[in-house]
Structures are given as C-alpha cells and as structure tokens.
Amino acid sequence: AQLVESGGGLVQAGGSLRLSCVASRDFMARYNMAWYRQVPGKQRSLVATITTRGFTTYTSSAKGRFTISRDTGKATVYLQMNSLTPEDTAVYYCNANPPQPVRWGQGTQVTVSS
C-alpha cells in the first residue's frame, strides 16, 4: 500500500510545521524510513532518515531545524520542521530508506512565504 503524508501547508518564514506519514505496522517494523522532498523541475532529495531502532541522520540543510521521529505503535513517521525558510518550499514525501518506488504517495505541499 502507498504511504499517506499530511501536515503540509502555507507558513511564514521562521514558522513551524509537523508532517505525518502513515504506513502499516508491518512496514514500519521492517524498514528504515526517511523523509524526502521535491521542488518542481528537480529530483526528489533526501531530508532525514530514521532506522528501525530510532537512529537519525539529517542533511546539512535540515540539521538543527528538523526532527524526524517514528511511532511504531501508530505506524507513523513524523517530521517536525522549525525555522522554516522559503528554500524549504517543496512537496514532502516519506518512504523507506532506500525508497521503494511502488510506495510513493501523493506527498504533502509545504510552502514557506518570505
């Protein structure tokens, strides 16, 4: 089944958003997860990762501002985004890490105004 992202929206620079991604419990238990984002005309890129044991990594642009977490019981992965800038404007997706092409969902749009 596809993953379902939510929580995006329009926010002013400096604001915060919390994204959610619902999967199945089996999927969450088996795979490391990640958040990705895509800007029109560019390839999808990695933002943050979290292993099944909760170990996290971040890209340089996300580190210190974003926090990835997972709740296996709720089969949900979160991305808390703080201090947002217009450069964070993108469609955000979650997937396994490495991603499984058949699992891509619709994503959730994040728009940061200056």
Image: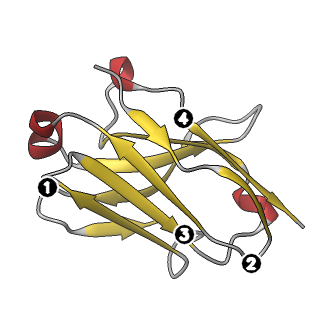
Q: Residues within 10 Å of mark 1 (few under 14, many from 20)?
A: some
Does residue 86 appear left or right of residue 95 in this picture? Answer: right
**Mark 1 or mark 3, which is nearer the start of the sequence?**
1
Q: Which residue is mark 2?
A: 14
Residue 33: percent from left, percent from top: 28, 48
Q: Quadrant of residue 82?
A: bottom right
Q: Residue at x 32, y 52 (%)?
A: 77
- Amino acid of disc 3: Ala
**C-alpha distance separating marks 4 and 2:** 22 Å
**Mark 3 or mark 2, which is nearer the start of the sequence?**
2
| Residue 52: assigned label | 1
Q: Nearer the viewer, mark 1 or mark 4?
A: 4
**Quadrant of the snapshot with the C terminus:** bottom right
- Amino acid of disc 4: Gly
User: Can residue 59 be spotted in the picture?
Assistant: no
* Disc 3 and disc 1 in contact, CB within 8 angstroms: no
Residue 89: percent from left, percent from top: 73, 52
Q: Is residue 15 above or below residue 3?
A: below
Q: Which residue is mark 3?
A: 62
- Amino acid of disc 1: Thr
The answer to which of 46 and 20 lies nearer the viewer is 20
